[in-house]
Image (cartoon, rainbow, N blue to C red):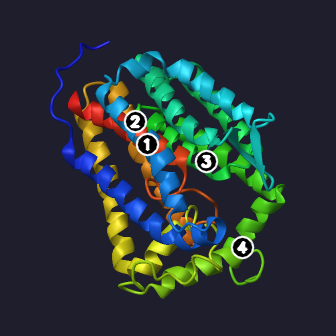
Amino acid sequence: MRARTKPKKVDYFFVSLIFLLTAFGLVMLSSASSDLGKMKFNDSYYHLKHQLIYSLSLGLAGFFIAANVYYRRWEKLALFFLIASIGLLGLVFTPLGVLSGDARRWIALGQFTFQPSEIVKLTFLIYLAAWLSKDKNRARNFITGFVPFFCLLAIIAGILLIQYSTSAIIIILITTIGVYFVSGARLRFIMIFVLIGLLLISLVVRFTPYRFDRIMSFLNPQSDPLGKTYQINQTLMSIGSGKIWGRGYGQSTTKIHYLPEPIGDSIFAIIAEELGFAGATGLIIAFFLLIWRSFVIAKKSADNFAKFLAIGFGLFVGSQTFVHIGALTGLIPLTGVPLPFISYGGTALAVFLTMAGIVTNISKHS
């Protein structure tokens, strides 16, 4: 292990982007959830207060703890964190699990509900960064590198598949394969992995009716506008109605009766409708800057563990943002995933803020 570097100033540009996006998310959540909160709880600010009290408070605690704890300490706890989070994935199939439709993705402890798949994104990234950084030749060896990596990823993906968390699988695959590639993995290993992954995903989609229906809806969005393709048509109309400058903050006409999940999986459509193409483009630019800055921090990092963590954070933010926006704009098949730092949801916000705190600490030791 390298000697601990003397802490320097944090990357304030990176931190500013994190809190700018978080503040923007709260502002847009206030608009997107006002009618819904009034209708369900007789409180226009119900969801905003819930996000502030539970999600943001946990996220800020995670950020400031991670930003002030030397990042190499997480390396020693990587295996414990991963095993614990995989155990949480299994708990969704116990009486503690919450069933919503056909999906089991949440655990309820009294009034506190959280999503283990979001936690696994962080713990698996920490473990993968620690595992790859211990031996620089591991990524280039098929037996000691590729096979263990593939088996561990297959276990996590298999559990998420049973939970109907397809979007989480895709985001984890993109991020971990990216980190594995950056670590020096041979290109043929990546190609083998991608081919096997595409084959397995194709088989799962073909023999899972609701996933197959989403692919068909993506290919022909006008086939059933009042049924299977209702959501994508509503999101496209919502985005299109914003035009260049938008209808105005709080003036969305689709967020209450027409658009499913306006405060979570569809919040980008509300942003585009109220703030227009200009506002949506500004948000995308902010995400690009955040991803770019995390890669800059990775380039300046003191060791491979830090490098892989910072790159993994950028890939997680980039892949989840692309999946969220791409699904709502018809670029990829529709799937439910929160927009980082913006959407309503405690676990996702807390995890992303904690990740950002780790990267902030890395910037202090670059």
- Which residue in the structure is indicated by mark 4? 217
Who is closer to the viewer here, 27 or 170?
A: 27
3D distance between C-alphas at marks 4 and 1: 39 Å
In the displayed structure, 95 sits above or below 341; it is above
In the displayed structure, 50 sits above or below 135; it is below
Where in the figure is residue 350, as x and y percent of width and height? 47, 42
Where the C terminus falls, by quadrant?
top left
Where in the figure is residue 155, as x and y percent of width and height? 69, 32
3D distance between C-alphas at marks 1 and 3: 24 Å
Disc 1, disc 2: CB below 8 Å?
A: yes
- Which residue in the structure is indicated by mark 3? 168
Q: Quadrant of residue 284?
A: bottom left
At a point 58% along the width and 77% down the height, the residue shown is 235
- Which residue in the structure is indicated by mark 1? 57
3D distance between C-alphas at marks 1 and 2: 6 Å
Question: Reading the chain from its start, which is encountered first: label 2 or label 4?
Answer: 2
Closer to the eye: label 2 or 3:
2
- Which residue in the structure is indicated by mark 2? 61
- Which amino acid lies under the numbered mark 3 shown in the image of this protein? Ala
